[in-house]
Amino acid sequence: MTVRKAVIPAAGYGTRFLPATKAVPKELLPIVDRPTIEYIVDECARAGLDDVLLVTSAGKSAIEDHFDRALELEAALEAKGKDDLLSTVRDLADLARVHAVRQGEQLGLGHAVLQARHHVGDESFAVLLGDDIVDPDDDLLERMIAAHDATGRAVVALMQVDEADVDKYGIASVGEPDDDGRLPVTGLVEKPDPADAPSDLAVIGRYVLPSGIFDVLDRTGRGAGGEIQLTDALETLAADEPIVGIQLDGIRHDAGDKFGFLAATIDFALRRDDLGPQLADHLRDLVATRLS
Ligand code: G1P
């Protein structure tokens, strides 16, 4: 297995969720009863990535606390005989070895990934963006790692989006898929105007990257939005030799957006035995009342 480290950028202000995110990192906003970032770290663990580096910023150390032991809390739960909660809390610390590095100033996603250079060293690694919540039943990350193992190339996750939405994403130029469904990505452009977009295939926040990306990022100037873009560094790689696209066919929620966050919350609650049936009934009644 060549990939065992994951990098999760988590330094942003979460302005789209203010005032909720004034004192609480957006990564800790709960989807049902688990912080958003727990779904991401869980996805890493399922794919065999047990070394997770958070790229954070001032005021966000509560994210690290979430994945640490909490001895006082554990003792209190034990004393009260709350064994289920106790193991839930304890298991979190065993999910992965979680490390953190600071991104002192926020100069873009490419700059955030560059902060992982020292920790990652010369290994290939995965990058997972916390706003993108992928269906836990989908093995997207495993497929991406397998594609990287087979090709040695950078791998991006792709998803078809509405033409009107292409300016929210990195958009790929792709060729025909090979027999394993891998798409050759010959170019990438960050947040193009719909009129200039090379396709409707958007990069969603999952990447498997060779360590050579760090040198490329180092040389990458500011791009869209005045930021150092990971997309631009990948475009440099793809111009040399196609990189690999793996298409997501299942569900992905954009939890960085208010609607997407609500949709994720409803989806995950509906999947739960303890909440799903009751919530489904409630939603049916509510829709009938509110929209009648
Ligand atoms: C980032 C990337 C973009 C990608 C998107 C996926 O943009 O820069 O290429 O398509 O994530 O969620 P952001 O949403 O951080 O602006």
Image: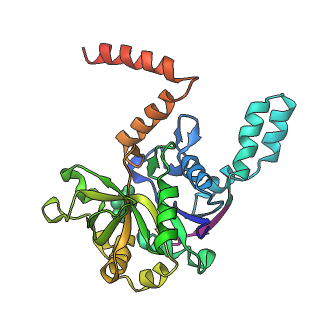
Identify the residue at image location x=37%, y=13%: 285
Identify the residue at image location x=49%, y=82%: 212
Based on the picture, tell me whether residue 112 belongs to the magenta stretch.
no
- State whether residue 203 appears in this view: yes
- Tell me the quarter of the image containing the N terminus: bottom right
Rendered image quadrant of residue 181: bottom left
Identify the residue at image location x=40%, y=64%: 156
Figure check: 114 above or below 98: below
- Residue 145 at x, y = what percent? 51, 63
Toward the right, the furthest residue is 79
Going by the image, does 222 lie left or right of 117?
left
- Frontmost residue, 65 versus 249: 249
Figure check: 184 above or below 23: below
Based on the picture, tell me whether residue 100 belongs to the magenta stretch.
yes
Figure check: 219 above or below 124: below
Toward the front, the furthest residue is 179
Assign ligand 1 to one image quadrant.
Answer: bottom left
- Residue 141 at x, y = what percent? 50, 56
- Frontmost residue, 134 versus 31: 134
Going by the image, does 260 lie left or right of 195?
right
- Frontmost residue, 38 versus 47: 47
Q: Magenta residues, as a range?
A: 98-105
